[in-house]
């Protein structure tokens, strides 16, 4: 049995590049940018008035002048006008071009205007004040957003500013989520005494929706020939298959043998962790056999890899494995950096098994700390316990006592 | 000029209830639940086998028996079978109903099976082990999810489990985002020397998309009669109007006077903060005048309030005001609790003006702390600086020195 670190390394060694697509900039929120975004002109593109008020030539002020005839108005969105007499002033609006022959802006609050004359009622001003100088935020050609940035509202605003009406983003993998298990019935059905409703598949759909992946779903009954023929087709069609269930020691846990028969290379099976231990992970190489992009095993041509995540079927096992393995695999495949977050244990924890313990916690923000309070569920089958918690804290297998006040990595699935 | 706390209180006093709608459960991610979700049956609904292995009557083991004839198999999804002879065993699969006349499960790892006989190779087992008892996670009728919960993947899984194929969620407000400013041109256009492209409106669209609000947008030129007639229509049609620009002291900042003329009650104008000081906030009461839900000012009937957020037009001002005022207004309107997050300043900050300082910071997770590192932008016009930061830290106006190591509230717009 391998460790969580080894398993994660193995998963991260299987990252893939799914290429790039161009989307309208307003559809790119939450996607990963695949081109650098540069300033198309200086920012600001002109000496920009930063306060509503009057603009003067500072030399006149320096000579002691405090009253200025108003020569005109410079509105935002109007072509630049020129101060004709440098003893006069021009009324200027925030966002306007600074008129010619002026170099200092005094805000309305510091001026009284009567009969076309503006009189200052302050005696200290700075030359060039209240002007947002051309190019101050960035020169034309400056790098504004790096490639591989996760696009937030801030990036959307910059795209708009530089006229990037379409942007290049990483293509999403084509993912199929497969549930197995004859005990499962649909959500709208009334289960018999020994049946339960499907839930993992929808939890996974939602975890993927969170990262803007639209996934397909399928359910296959515990029938080996059927499972095999369906999976053979899915392996050719999809980039990633996420399974929930049928990877443990049960008589009907057919997946590991089917994967072997279908030439899916087992990268590992079972990880020293709780919950989620029977996790099966592998990949299959496929080669394009015709121009319609039909893929077959072991044929020479344009190659693709299908990645197979076989998550154990217990709800918490599926949930935590998606966060611990699939998310980092996805982010790294997209070219993103993965950052670690840590939190401080809010109480002592004792855990004896020689396994990494993914403990469910409620996160609180206290004086700039993140504090993780363990919430005891009833084991990996207790889906409802996920509603009470925000994150998993990762307690390593090298000790059995975890002291209140010590910090460990966390994986959040809910914000504070 | 009022303080940020006073302004926020005022905004929160204008929260509204937009009613409830029913949506398919898989479309409810990110929405706010408006009904309690109860267990429709016990969870688990039967004594559930929690390990693949064999099930025995513990009494036989206690009497010293270590080998058991296998009488049958209990698969997941099959009706409960019965152990006929309590000296025998039944093979059982994870997720199956526990057969009748057995009460203890021993996993395959601790058993050798040969010629239809299972022999234990361990000598210590616990009565009732490896069984997830009926009702252990929750009895039928138990509250699984509280009303007013923000729906994450965890809640989606529980909806599926209890058969909630449709769920009641808070209706979203109908929001229009209006940009003004004659200097603005479209994203796909090439601006003239004194023009810039629209960006705030798209930043706001994206900030609202983050909280699952689909908004409309409009642009109006700086022409007072046109502004007034358009806004008169929008006030009747929408629940919320978000403006960007035209609320300061400029000659063409017509909005405050137009709002007054249209009977929009000014709740406040200007807040002691930087950036975003000229923020205008108000509301207008409308009354339904016919059965087509056409609303007019000051008519008696079914009432609605239109909330008006007049954000200053500088990019950072609009951005921060949306986070500081609109987000909490939205969450409280939806019935959600608002939690505060804090971070520790990573370096000394000095800020003299008697204003709350919304300082842009980069957040790092260090040993369970959140540390906020200030990033200096070039003022409220510097949209590109938002790309370099993750959050705003809220430095109060009661002092001028903020020491490294002290903690303050933060508002994050990007995860670590």
Image (spheres, coloured by chain):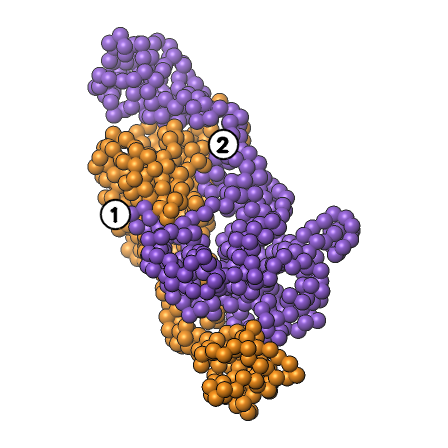
Chain colours: A orange, B purple
Query: Could you tell me which chain the residue with mark 2 belongs to?
Result: B
Asked whether residue B347 is in view, the answer is yes
Give left or right: position of A341 versus B286.
Answer: left
* Position of residue B212 measured from the top left corner of the image (x, y, whole percent): 53, 51
Q: Which residue is mark 2?
A: B144
- State how far apart marks 1 and 2 are (Cα): 36 Å
In this view, which residue lies farthest toward the top? B63
User: Which one is in front, B191 or A279?
Assistant: B191
**Number of other residues with Cα within 10 Å of mark 2, as a class: few under 14, some 14 to 19, many 20 or more:** many
* Position of residue B231 measured from the top left corner of the image (x, y, whole percent): 67, 64
Share a chain, discs 1 and 2?
no
For the residues carrying marks 1 and 2, which lies nearer the camera in this image? Answer: 2
| Label 1 secondary element | helix
Query: Could you tell me which chain the residue with mark 1 belongs to?
Result: A
At 77% from the left and 48% from the top, the residue drawn is B301
Is residue A329 shown above or below A255? below
- If the image is split into quadrants, where does the C terminus of chain A sit? top left
Q: Which residue is mark 1?
A: A9
* Position of residue B298 measured from the top left corner of the image (x, y, whole percent): 76, 55
| Label 2 secondary element | strand
Give left or right: position of A304 versus B12.
Answer: left
Asked whether residue A313 is in view, the answer is no
Is residue B115 shown above or below B405? above
> Quarter-wise, where is residue B308 in the image?
bottom right
Is residue B221 shown above or below B89? below
Give left or right: position of B305 versus A33.
Answer: right
- If the image is split into quadrants, where does the N terminus of chain A sit? top left
> Quarter-wise, where is residue B224 in the image?
bottom right
At 31% from the left and 9% from the top, the residue drawn is B59
* Position of residue B106 measured from the top left corner of the image (x, y, whole percent): 29, 20
**Number of other residues with Cα within 10 Å of mark 1, as a class: few under 14, some 14 to 19, many 20 or more:** few
At 38% from the left and 12% from the top, the residue drawn is B101
């Amino acid at each position: 049995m391998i460790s969580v670190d080894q398993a994660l390394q193995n998963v991260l060694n299987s990252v893939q590049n799914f290429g790039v697509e161009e989307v309208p900039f307003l559809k790119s929120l939450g996607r990963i940018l695949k081109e650098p975004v540069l300033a198309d002109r200086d920012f600001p593109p002109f000496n920009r008035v930063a306060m509503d008020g009057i603009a003067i030539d500072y030399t006149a002020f320096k000579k002691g002048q405090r009253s200025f005839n108003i020569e005109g108005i410079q509105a935002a969105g109007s072509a630049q006008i020129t101060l004709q007499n440098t003893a006069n002033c021009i009324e200027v609006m925030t966002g306007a071009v600074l008129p010619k022959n002026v170099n200092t802006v005094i805000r309305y609050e510091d001026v009284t205007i009567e009969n076309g004359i503006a009189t200052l009622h302050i005696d200290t001003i700075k030359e060039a004040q209240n002007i947002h100088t051309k190019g101050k935020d960035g020169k034309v050609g400056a790098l504004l957003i790096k490639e591989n940035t996760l696009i937030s509202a801030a990036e959307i605003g910059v795209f708009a500013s530089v006229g990037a009406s379409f942007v290049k983003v990483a293509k999403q993998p084509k993912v199929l989520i497969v549930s197995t298990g004859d005990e499962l019935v649909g959500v709208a059905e009334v289960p018999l005494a020994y049946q339960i409703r499907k839930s993992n598949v929808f939890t996974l759909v939602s975890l993927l929706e969170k990262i803007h992946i639209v996934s397909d779903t399928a359910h296959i009954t515990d029938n080996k020939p059927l499972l095999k023929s369906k999976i053979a087709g899915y392996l050719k069609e999809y980039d990633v298959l996420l399974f929930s269930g049928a990877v443990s020691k049960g008589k009907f846990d057919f997946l590991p043998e089917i994967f072997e028969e279908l030439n899916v290379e087992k990268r590992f099976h079972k990880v020293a962790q709780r919950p989620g231990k029977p996790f099966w992970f592998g990949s299959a190489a496929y080669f394009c056999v015709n121009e319609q992009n039909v893929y077959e095993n072991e044929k020479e041509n344009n190659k693709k890899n299908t990645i197979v995540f076989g998550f154990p079927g217990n709800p918490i096992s599926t949930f935590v494995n998606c966060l611990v393995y699939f998310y980092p695999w996805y982010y790294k495949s997209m070219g993103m950096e993965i950052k670690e977050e840590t939190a401080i244990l809010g109480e002592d924890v004792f855990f004896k098994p020689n396994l990494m313990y993914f403990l469910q916690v409620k996160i609180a923000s206290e004086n700039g700390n993140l504090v993780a309070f363990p919430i005891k569920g009833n084991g990996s089958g207790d889906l409802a316990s996920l509603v009470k918690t925000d994150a998993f804290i990762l307690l390593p297998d090298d000790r059995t006592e975890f002291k209140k006040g010590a910090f460990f990595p966390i994986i959040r699935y809910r914000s504070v």
